[in-house]
Amino acid sequence: MKNKDASTSTDLPLAKISSAESLLVAAGRDRRPGAPLNRPPVPASNFILGTERAYSRDDGTPTWEALEEIVGLLEGGHTVAFSSGMAGVAAVFDQLRVGAQVVLPDDCYQGVVGLAELGNQKGLWSLRRLAVDDTAGWVRACTDADLIWLESPSNPLLTVADVRTICSATRKPSALLAIDNTFATSLNQRPLDLGADVSFQSATKFIGGHSDLLAGVVTVRRDDLRAALRRSRELNGATPGALESFLAVRGARTMALRLERAQANAMILAERLHAHPRVALVRYPGLSSHPTHSVARDQLKGFGTIISFDVRGEAAAADKVCSRVSLIHHATSLGAVESTIERRAGIPGQEHLPPSLLRLSVGIENVEELWEDLAAALRDE
């Protein structure tokens, strides 16, 4: 990174910190005497000339570099921050040559699908879709694909891919294997350690954690790939804002605590939903009934905070649940302190999903009160 200067935290031997919990709190700070304890937002477009930092779009700011340092240390690589999750995804796709082959999961975030399909329609690349749990199919695809894009656990069906096996498959030298790590977070899964080239997260979700920002982070280990991603960010103007970067850093400080509480809540709620007579199916990797539970148990440090479940009945039954909750918010997105629920098949582009499937993002509220809210919303009339 060309723009490191005297404001960057280099005094603390961060490499000696082994726990993610401590890194989240310690990284990304300016430790010089007299410096502010917390990295402030730097709403500057340009800087006094005389160092390597001249213009923020090209050279970055101390605020978003703090975010990059935190995530990079957590993921075990070098992070490039973007203005949104989709800006980060687009930068990865921007590395493809015309005519490239892209492989995407059958269950995948709709924004990624939309981007991939648009490029396919324009003739920029060809697109194939594979089932998340078709490990043999992914291994075969690695032999000729230029971009292997995995999402694990997947959105919203929560299928866990055998990332370790897929990443160990032989792929051509120029290929990129990218993992969308948003649902797992870098606290539960480190894709680069498993053999991936790229680890992506929407920082809007668990990193920010408070439903108040848009940001994306892409982490790699290769210096040439990091430089290419930074160049894409610069030329496409996909730079993170000062306030958004500040909020993401502040949110990251408590991510371990939030995730621990929300995961514990999610496990309890998943077990209770599984036993509820109004619920036809619960999809949560932590349940032994989940089809990819054994892979999740082997691969993930935690099972996450997202539960997808099918209400008995059709779309109207699921919509009724959404309209009845009060502590839980009927809203989209995930990974924040508050619990949210939505019927995914009601969203354009998601019509292929089961009509009564609800995606629940579990927050940090009292679990008994969350269950009371769900149980009341699921009651028979």
Image (cartoon, helix red, strand yellow):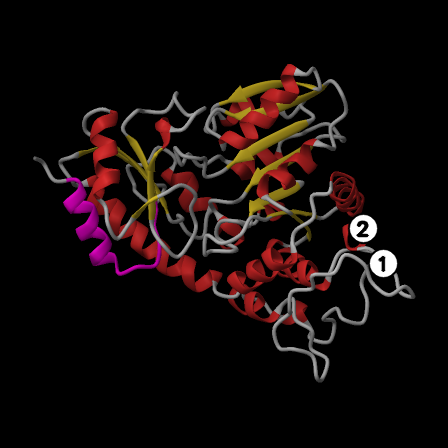
> What residue sits 70% from the left and 84% below the top?
34
Q: Quadrant of the N terminus?
A: bottom right
Residue 371 seen: yes
Image-quadrant location for residue 320: top left
Residue 117: x, y in percent? 59, 21
Image-quadrant location for residue 65: bottom right
* Helix, strand or loop for the magenta stretch, by majority: helix
Residue 101: x, y in percent? 67, 20
Q: Amino acid at mark 2?
A: Asp
Q: Quadrant of the C terminus?
A: top left
Q: Within the magenta stretch, is there residue 139?
A: no
Above/below status of 108 relative to 5: above
Q: Which residues are magenta?
A: 361-378
Q: Residue furthest bottom?
A: 33
Most foreground residue, 169 or 2: 2
To which residue does mark 1 refer?
54
Q: Amino acid at mark 1?
A: Ala
Q: Within the magenta stretch, is there residue 369?
A: yes
State left or right for residue 10 relative to residue 298.
Answer: right
Task: Tell me the element at label 1.
Answer: loop
To which residue does mark 2 refer?
58
Residue 331: x, y in percent? 36, 43
> What distance separates the C-alpha of mark 2 from that of mark 1?
8 Å
Above/below status of 147 relative to 272: above
Dot 2 crowding, Cα within 10 Å, few <14, some 14–19, many 20+: some
Above/below status of 94 relative to 303: above
State left or right for residue 5 relative to residue 178.
Answer: right
Residue 196 seen: no
Most foreground residue, 301 or 75: 75
Image-quadrant location for residue 180: top right
